[in-house]
Image (tube, grey):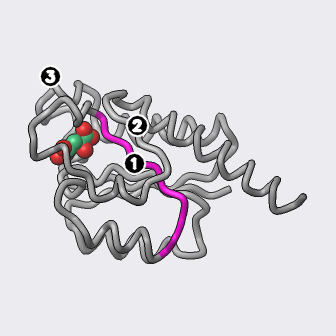
Amino acid sequence: MKLLVINGPNINMLGIREKSIYGSKNYKDLQEYIKMIGKREAIEIDEFQSNYEGEIVDCIQKAYQVYDGIIINPAAYTHTSIAILDALKAVNIPTVEVHLSNVSKREAYRQISYVKEYAIKRYVGLSFLGYEEAILFLKKYLGEKNENLNN
Ligand code: DQA
């Protein structure tokens, strides 16, 4: 099982940006946290972060037939990017949407999520734990999918 974690713009600024919303841990801490979960769960996990919409689209396209599942925090592109939604639909890889903050309780412009339309699961407001939940969810989901294929 191979998973890809994609983080969008300004996630690399964790630990500096709006600490009261996003906490004091930095992006390196998040990367290490995800690595640690991957090791613990014996899952191969790659991580990608970009501030550019097109690079995120490229990354999703390259995931085709390489990864079994995607975990994505598109950050601000969540609320604007049909291109990211279309890329996810194109590669047709089971995807979980994650947000560190509870977007559903924030500004009106954060209530829209284009990715939500495609994601099979969504975790918001759980900080780093949201990524762990997403990994565990995909592990179970993909495991069950394989079992059904083998029966
Ligand atoms: C975010 C929420 C978005 O609205 C915001 O633009 C981000 C981070 C989150 O993880 O809570 O950059 O995706």
Quarter of the image for residue 29 reads top left
Residue 119 screen position, x and y as percent: 44, 54
Which badge, 1 or 2, comes first in the chain's sequence? 1
Q: Nearer the viewer, mark 3 or mark 2?
A: 2
How far is the residue under mark 3 from the one under mark 1? 22 Å
Q: Earlier in the sequence, mark 3 or mark 2?
A: 3
The amino acid type, in three-letter code, at marker 3 is: Ser
Q: Secondary structure at mark 3?
A: helix
Give the labeled residue for mark 3.
20
Label 1: state its secondary structure.
strand
The residue located at (35%, 73%) in the rendering is 86
**Could you tell me which quadrant the N terminus lies in?**
bottom right
Q: For numbered disc 2, what is the local secondary structure?
A: strand
Placement of the C terminus among the 4 image quadrants:
bottom right
Disc 2 designates what residue?
A: 123
Q: Which residues are magenta?
A: 91-100
Task: Specify whether tag 3 is near ligand 1 (CB below 8 Å).
Answer: no
- Residue assigned mark 1: 97
Q: Residue at 39% across / 31% down in the picture?
A: 128
